Amino acid sequence: MKADICAHITEQLKTQRKLSRLSDALKKTILEKLLGKAGSMFRWVHCQLDKIVACKGRIHIEAALDNLPAGLYETYD
């Protein structure tokens, strides 16, 4: 499952216009942090990627990554 989630995140980082423009270092951070907390929750990953896309720059992305919700319930709170 983790490999599938990793592949999904990697694909989004390559193909989503806003995400593909980020530095390689920031993409690596996004991948590591999302994988570290995703468990087997594809929906959680999707929601977090949506939130990251909505961020207005590196500082806001890093803040979002530092405050990732623990699960889906917290995501929707």
Image: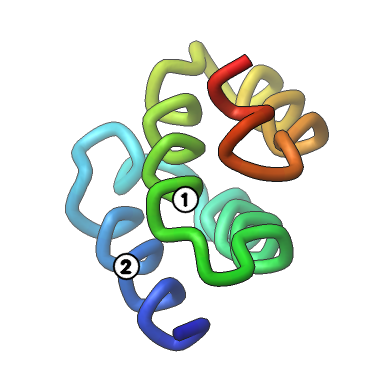
- In the drawing, what numbered circle is on residue 45? 1
Kind of element beneath mark 1: helix
Task: Please name the amino acid that badge 2 sits on.
Answer: His
Instruction: Answer few, some or many: residues within 10 Å of disc 1's Cα (few below 14, many 20 plus, some between 14 and 19).
Output: many
Q: Which mark is residue 19?
A: none
Q: Residue at x 37, y 45 (%)?
A: 46
User: What quarter of the picture does the N terminus occupy?
Assistant: bottom left
Q: Could you tell me how far apart the alpha carbons at marks 2 and 1 are, in whole angstroms?
A: 9 Å
Nearer-the-camera pick, 32 or 58? 32
Q: Residue at x 52, y 59 (%)?
A: 24
- Dividing the picture into quarters, in which one does residue 28 lie? bottom right
Q: Nearer the viewer, residue 3 or 12?
A: 3
The image position of residue 62, as x and y in percent, is: 71, 32
Question: In screen coordinates, is 11 left or right of 63?
Answer: left
10 lies left or right of 64 = left
Q: Badges 2 and 1: C-beta atoms under 8 Å apart? A: yes
Q: Quadrant of residue 39?
A: bottom right
Q: Nearer the viewer, mark 2 or mark 1?
A: 1
Residue 8: image tag: 2
Chain-order first, disc 2 or disc 1? 2
**Residue 42 screen position, x and y as percent:** 40, 59
**Quadrant where the C terminus is found in the figure:** top right
Residue found at x 44% / y 42%: 22
User: Is the image coloured rainbow, by chain, by secondary structure, or in one colour?
Assistant: rainbow
Taking the spot 50% from the left edge, 12% from the top edge, the residue there is 56
Give the amino acid at mark 1.
Answer: Val
Locate residue 73 relative to residue 54 in the image: left or right: right
Residue extending farthest to the right is 66
| Residue 14: percent from left, percent from top | 26, 59
